[in-house]
Amino acid sequence: MVPGSGGGSGTAEDPFRGLAAADAQAQLRDVVLVHAGMYRSTWSPRANGEPGRPIVWSGGVDGEAMLHGQGQAAERPERGICAESLHDGYFERLTVRSAQFLIVASHAQRLVLWAFHLYGGTTALRPPPATAPARC
């Protein structure tokens, strides 16, 4: 997967363009290679794994894979990654920056964050505040 806004078939020659495009096609036990670059705006992954059969999002294969919540927006968004109700996901070697809450994972189960870098947020990892909407 490479930065972009949709498309691609998921092969080495024609990678998915953007997190949403890869997430829409992710299946049990998939390892999604997140290539170097800046992925802008909030990401709300929806593809779930199962116990022992997670979906793996692996960055750092060819440089820093940065999820930049603010992107080109004038103001910093509330969330960088919104993983509410997500389960059985493995996230490794990714950088998340520039959101009020870098990762929101309420009602999530069996998520693994490994070699993660979190910068520029008010709070790194937490459930949403009581005033936040129930869903991303």
Image: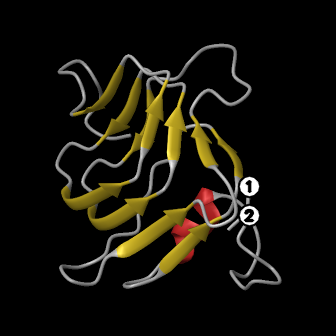
Q: In which quadrant of the rendered image does the C terminus lie?
A: top left
Who is closer to the viewer here, 74 or 1?
A: 1
- Going by the numbered disc 1, the residue's amino acid type is Pro
Who is closer to the viewer here, 73 or 52?
A: 52
- Going by the numbered disc 2, the residue's amino acid type is Arg
Q: In the figure, is residue 57 to the left or right of 110?
A: right
Who is closer to the viewer here, 52 or 60?
A: 60
Q: Residue at x 34, y 49 (%)?
A: 83
Q: In the figure, is residue 52 to the left or right of 29?
A: left
Image quarter of residue 62? bottom right
Q: Residue at x 62, y 67 (%)?
A: 61
Type of colouring: secondary structure
Q: In x, y percent, where is residue 117?
A: 45, 40
Q: In which quadrant of the rendered image does the N terminus lie?
A: bottom right
Q: In x, y percent, where is residue 42?
A: 53, 39
**Rendered image: mark on residue 17:** 2
- The alpha-carbon separation of the residues under discs 1 and 2 comes to 6 Å
Q: Callout 1: few (<14), some (14-19), or many (20+) C-alpha neighbours within 10 Å? A: many
Image quarter of residue 48? bottom left
Image quarter of residue 32? bottom right
**Rendered image: mark on residue 47:** none
**Rendered image: mark on residue 3:** 1
Q: Residue at x 32, y 41 (%)?
A: 135
1 and 2 marks in contact (CB < 8 Å): yes
Q: In x, y percent, where is residue 103?
A: 36, 38
